[in-house]
Image (cartoon, rainbow, N blue to C red):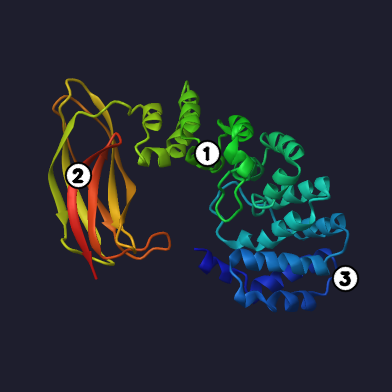
Amino acid sequence: MADRLKDLFDERCVRSIARDLRSAHPGLDERGFARDCLASLADLELTGRASHIADVMHHHLPQPFPEAAQVIVASLGPELGRSDAFGLAPLQYMPHVFYVAKRGLDHFEDAMTAQYELTKRFSAEFSIRSFLTRHADATMRRLRAWATDPNVHVRRLVSEGTRPRLPWAPRLRAFQQDPGPVIELLELLKDDPERYVQRSVANNINDISKDHPTLAADLCRRWLDDAPPGRRWIVGHALRSLVKKGDRGALDALGFAEEPRVEVASVSLSPRPVKLGGELRFSFEITSTAPRDQELLVDCAVHFVKANGSTRPRVFKLRKLVLPPSGRAEIAGKVSFEEMTTRRHYPGRHRIDAMVNGVPHPLGQFEVCR
């Protein structure tokens, strides 16, 4: 995905940034700024391009940093709306947050003011991490205050910026070792009314679960006590990685801890073989053998062949259902073998299992060919 996004930082984008900066600082050499940005842009990837433009900013903006930060803030366009459906245009501010991260560490208040404004137009989730490393206590105090800010983008930054494993960003090793300070912030956000913030909180807990699965499951179990709908949604999304792994603590938190008493039959896999670029369609019937109702979480695990011939399972969500004694349900789905940016496909023998409350039930094997 980043390979495609890098093309957003093209000549048009560079000249737009130059115009915006010059509108706030008439002394800016607009042509020289654009020339210096474009000189090395073609050979760089997404974050490399943003970092390069940030370095050019340093050479063309007034110094010291507080003056440059005032220009950056004054050059910003309108704030984003409340929805997260705002497209890719805000990415043009990625160089601005990189500039703050690189040049503002010795100017805490001015940098915080800049990030507060930038996150309303793009996100300061990348730059805030440098301050969490250099000024941990002061930054955490500021984030606690921002957790109740009226602006949804500021509140989201509190969660997104503290994710231990934020994509495209260096990991926050201290929070990987001890996520306690992060959880204190998430407690302030667990009942935020905006799904945009809720999703970020869930993603943060999902990050935490990869290093501390028991802690994440216990947190979510506690949060489910008298939980409103928004918090219940957070928990379901937060535990997705653990559920896919069949983690008993996560399944227990969600109410699917009991060993399922079921039979799986009437399996259909087609076509056979599956061609690369095609899709596998599957179905099966699940029958309860328990003397009472069972709450069941039904997924499927496809063991994809890797380049070296080994296999690795990937779990796909299917259904949640309640089966009465002797109750039956037909489950169906499909698996794509089209090329994706997140998954490459290789020919060979694959396997598929039904996962019922985390317990695998083999559905069969199938060949994938060219």
263 vs 241, left or right, is left
Mark 1 — residue? Answer: 208
Residue 290, how many percent across, how many down? Answer: 17, 24
> What residue sits 14% from the left and 50% below the top?
268
Label 2: how many Cα within 10 Å (few below 14, some 14–19, many 20+): some
Quick one: quadrant of the C terminus? bottom left
Which residue type does callout 3 highlight? Gly
> What residue sits 24% from the left and 26% below the top?
294
Which is more N-terminal, label 3 or label 2? 3
- Per the rendering, the mark at residue 356 is none
Which is more N-terminal, label 1 or label 3? 3
At mark 2, the secondary structure is strand
Residue 34, how many percent across, how many down? Answer: 73, 76
The quadrant holding residue 311 is bottom left
Q: How many numbered discs sit on the rendered protein?
A: 3
Residue 321, how many percent across, how many down? Answer: 27, 33
Mark 2 — residue? Answer: 362
Mark 3 — residue? Answer: 27
Q: Nearer the viewer, residue 265 or 303?
A: 303
